[in-house]
Amino acid sequence: MRVSLTGTPGTGKSTVAGLLRERFRVFSVRELAEKHGCGEMSGEEMAIDTDCLNEKLRGIGDCIIEGHLSHHLEPDIIIILRCHPEILRKRLEKRGYPEGKLLENLEAEAVDVILEEALETGKPVYEIDTTEKSPEEVASCVIDIMDGNGNAYAPGKIDWSEVILSWY
């Protein structure tokens, strides 16, 4: 089974993926793109060609692919990490995100951009609210979903729309 661990930057994907590496084969989208020549540096960021990467990943086998583009890489299931925008703001500010990029990511989280993209794939989609969970708790939730116990994580229970209204 190929699992996509996706979400807006700052929701905990890399941290949780690091914990899951103890039990599973885990790759980041970026490391796969670099390894297979499917990415090009654009300033400090890598522009990733997901079509190229999909072609290179055929037959990769069971693994978890972590990254905010991983849901575009033909997963069997998609697990989206979510975080309340006010907490997400603090996390991204600590990373030094410029205001424009910070607001773009907060808005994407608040209006469910990744959820909408994931649902369009037709694959099973699950959401985990990481706002008040430790990385270990989130990793345990991911394992529960992978073990077939995903009912508690069905999409549509997380709604940050009230946050957007407070911005205007």
Image (cartoon, rainbow, N blue to C red):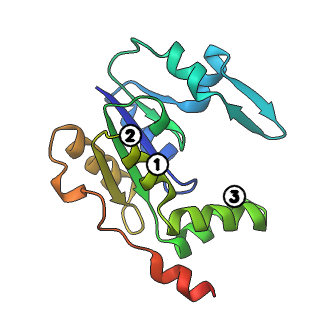
Question: Which labelled disc corresponds to residue 48?
Answer: none
Q: CA distance from mark 3 to mark 1?
A: 25 Å
Pointer 2 or 3: first along the chain: 3
Whether pointer 1 and pointer 2 mark residues with C-beta atoms closer than 8 Å, the reply is yes
Task: Name the residue tied to disc 3.
Answer: 95
Q: Residue at x 40, y 61 (%)?
A: 130
* Position of residue 80 measured from the top left corner of the image (x, y, whole percent): 40, 50
Inspect the image, locate mark 1, and give the three-letter code of the amino acid beneath it: Glu
Q: Can see residue 76?
A: yes
Inspect the image, locate mark 2, and give the three-letter code of the amino acid beneath it: Thr
Q: CA distance from mark 1 to mark 2?
A: 7 Å
Q: Residue at x 48, y 52 (%)?
A: 114
Whether pointer 3 and pointer 1 mark residues with C-beta atoms closer than 8 Å, the reply is no
Task: Name the residue tied to disc 1.
Answer: 117
Q: Secondary structure at mark 1?
A: helix
Task: Name the residue tied to disc 2.
Answer: 121
* Position of residue 2 measured from the top left corner of the image (x, y, whole percent): 34, 27
Q: Nearer the viewer, residue 7 or 168?
A: 168
Q: Can see residue 32?
A: no
Residue 91, relative to residue 161: is it above or below?
above
Q: Report crowding for label 1: few under 14, some 14 to 19, many 20 or more residues within 10 A (C-alpha).
A: few
Whether pointer 2 and pointer 3 mark residues with C-beta atoms closer than 8 Å, the reply is no
Q: CA distance from mark 2 to mark 3?
A: 31 Å
Q: Nearer the viewer, residue 118 or 93?
A: 118
Pointer 3 or 1: first along the chain: 3
Which mark lies nearer to you, 2 or 3?
A: 2
Which mark lies nearer to you, 3 or 1?
A: 1
Q: Secondary structure at mark 2?
A: loop
